[in-house]
Amino acid sequence: MGGNITSMELYPRPERLLVELRARGIADNAPVLVEMLSEIDQLHYHGTAALDIAIKRAEIGSASRVLEIGSGWGGCARWIAHRAGASVTAVEMQADYDRIGRTLTARAGLDDRVMHVNADFLEFQLAGPYTHVVSWLALFHIPDRPRCLGKIADALEPTGVLWAEDLYARGPVPGNERAAFNARLFPNSLVTIDEYRAGLHQAGLEIMEVEDMSQDWGHFTETRTASFRADRAAFEHRHGSATFEALDRFYDGMASDFARSFVGGLRILARKG
Ligand SMILES: C[S@@+](CC[C@H](N)C(=O)[O-])C[C@H]1O[C@@H](n2cnc3c(N)ncnc32)[C@H](O)[C@@H]1O
């Protein structure tokens, strides 16, 4: 289905993160602590708690060489480098998110361990092998799943590990809602769980753990919408009403997509070999 991901309502004004920092008294270009940054730079569910689970279950440590696909502002990459001591290559397609991400990494003093690359993962020149490929809520955006999974397998060393949190197709989206659904999610390769498993197998990735996160993420997205609305006045003061409206439509739509089983959530650990 293609389309321009920069128009996705999850991603208005990447500079809004800098506005949030200013609101916390941190000037542009001033040093920033990862712990503080991580409260506002995570674009997936459950923030750093989800990353700590990945670090533990995928056994990411100081000797790990990690490739992150779809790094957004770089929040996951910085946390993994900071918490586990790993070196991380963070690949992000949107130039403005990548640009802000790399300045934040430098401001956090992590530019010796996190390398940002502004690229479409499918075009990215692999420089591995990596011990881990990780991704949070990005793989469903990437068209041509067999090519994407094949490239992930190529990126990994012989015993390398894939850890991914991703969306999957849980049930049919009515025809008259499909255009809005596609515009909201950019689901360029949203597949069923069975297709997900088959795709990993075909790419030579053996599934070690699969956790269905649908109920948990359904609850998370519902609560997120409610707390976002409760903070409306303060948010609009910082970012304006257009940004509030855009994010509100996205958050509300996402909660509804989970509630109506248009999408489900997955956490996957797979090993090459
Ligand atoms: C939901 S965000 C998650 C960002 C980050 N993983 C996080 O949790 O904070 C998904 C990101 O994947 C990026 N993305 C989508 N398709 C991509 C591709 N083909 N190559 C690289 N990045 C991509 C998007 O631009 C977006 O920043």
Image (spheres, rainbow, N blue to C red):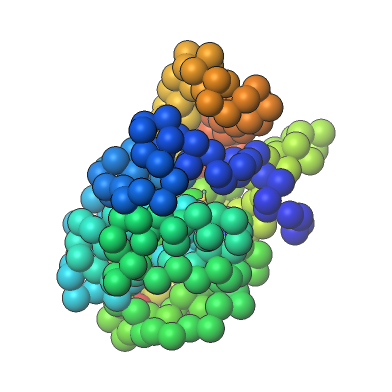
Q: In the image, residue 58 lies at what x, y percent?
A: 25, 63
Q: Quadrant of residue 12?
A: top right
Q: In the image, residue 93 lies at what x, y percent?
A: 59, 63
Q: Residue at x 37, y 59 (%)?
A: 105
Can residue 147 be spotted in the picture? no
Image position of 20 with respect to 244: above or below: below
Query: Where does the C terminus fall, quadrant-wise?
Result: bottom left
Q: Residue at x 55, y 78 (%)?
A: 124
Query: Who is closer to the viewer here, 91 or 59?
Result: 91
Can residue 79 be spotted in the picture? yes
Query: Who is closer to the viewer here, 132 or 213?
Result: 132
The tally of labels here is 0
Q: Residue at x 18, y 70 (%)?
A: 62
Q: Residue furthest right?
A: 176
Q: Residue at x 42, y 30 (%)?
A: 23
Image position of 115 with respect to 229: above or below: below
Q: Quadrant of residue 128?
A: bottom left
Query: Who is closer to the viewer here, 255 or 35?
Result: 35
Image position of 58 with respect to 171: above or below: below
